[in-house]
Image (tube, rainbow, N blue to C red):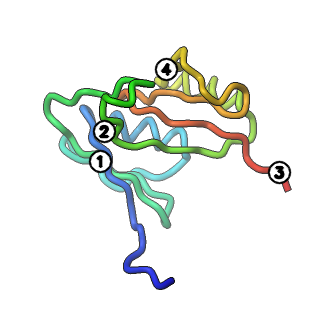
């Protein structure tokens, strides 16, 4: 199958683009490539994530499927407990509802978006 296009980045709604970008910059170890009041972006040189200010932003309500979840990121980590601790220290929140049991963990970023930390496959 021939691709029509290539994904160059993902843009996320945000109440505070600079803070939102800084959270994921620290989680992913990427570089900040733009940091303005209305828009911020981070990149690893191959992939980018942009954060655009939305006035009156309302976060999705995890796990309420009717609340309009805007995106969901899965991140590979080497150690679930250490990664969770680090993300929580950076401002993430761990909701009570955890559908993955011990296989993965759902966290909420500082803007309320859910994301998962997943064990990196071995081998």
Asked whether, in this view, residue 88 is left or right of residue 4, the answer is: right
The reply to whether dot 3 and dot 4 touch (C-beta < 8 Å) is no
Residue displayed at 40% across by 52% down: 42
The outermost residue toward the right is 123
Image spot of residue 69 (x, y percent): 35, 36
Residue under label 3: 122
Q: Position of residue 24 (x, y in %)?
A: 46, 41
Q: Residue at x 66, y 33 (%)?
A: 104
Side (left or right) of 34 relative to 1: left
Q: Quadrant of residue 22?
A: top left
Mark 3 → mark 4, Cα distance in angstroms:
27 Å
Tell me, for residue 93, which label it has, or none. Answer: 4
Residue position marked by numbered label 1 in the rendering = 40
Give how far across and how far down residue 86 sits, in percent.
61, 28
Residue placed most toward the observer, 105 or 29: 105
Quadrant that contains the C terminus: bottom right
Q: Above or below — where is 110 with respect to 38?
A: above
Q: On the rendered structure, is 100 left or right of 25?
A: right
Q: Secondary structure at mark 2?
A: helix
The residue identified by callout 2 is 18
- Please, what secondary structure does the residue beneath circle 3 have? loop
Whether pointer 1 and pointer 4 mark residues with C-beta atoms closer than 8 Å, the reply is no
Q: Are marks 3 and 1 in contact (CB under 8 Å)?
A: no
Around disc 3, counting alpha carbons within 10 Å, would you say few (fewer than 14), some (14 to 19), or many (20 or more)? Answer: few
Gap in angstroms between the C-alphas marked 2 and 4: 19 Å
Whole-angstrom CA distance, mark 1 to mark 4, is 22 Å
Which mark, by number, is residue 109? Answer: none
């Amino acid at each position: 199958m021939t691709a029509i296009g290539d994904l160059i980045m993902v843009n996320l709604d945000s109440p505070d683009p600079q803070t939102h970008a800084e959270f994921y910059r620290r989680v992913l170890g990427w570089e900040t490539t733009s940091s303005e009041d209305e828009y911020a972006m981070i990149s690893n040189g191959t992939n980018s994530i942009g954060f655009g200010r939305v006035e009156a932003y309302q976060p999705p309500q995890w796990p309420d499927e009717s609340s309009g979840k805007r995106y969901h990121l899965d991140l590979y980590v080497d150690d679930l407990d250490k990664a969770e601790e680090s993300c929580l220290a950076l401002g993430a929140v761990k909701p009570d509802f955890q559908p993955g049991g011990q296989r993965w963990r759902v966290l909420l970023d500082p803007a309320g978006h859910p994301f998962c930390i997943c064990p990196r496959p071995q081998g």
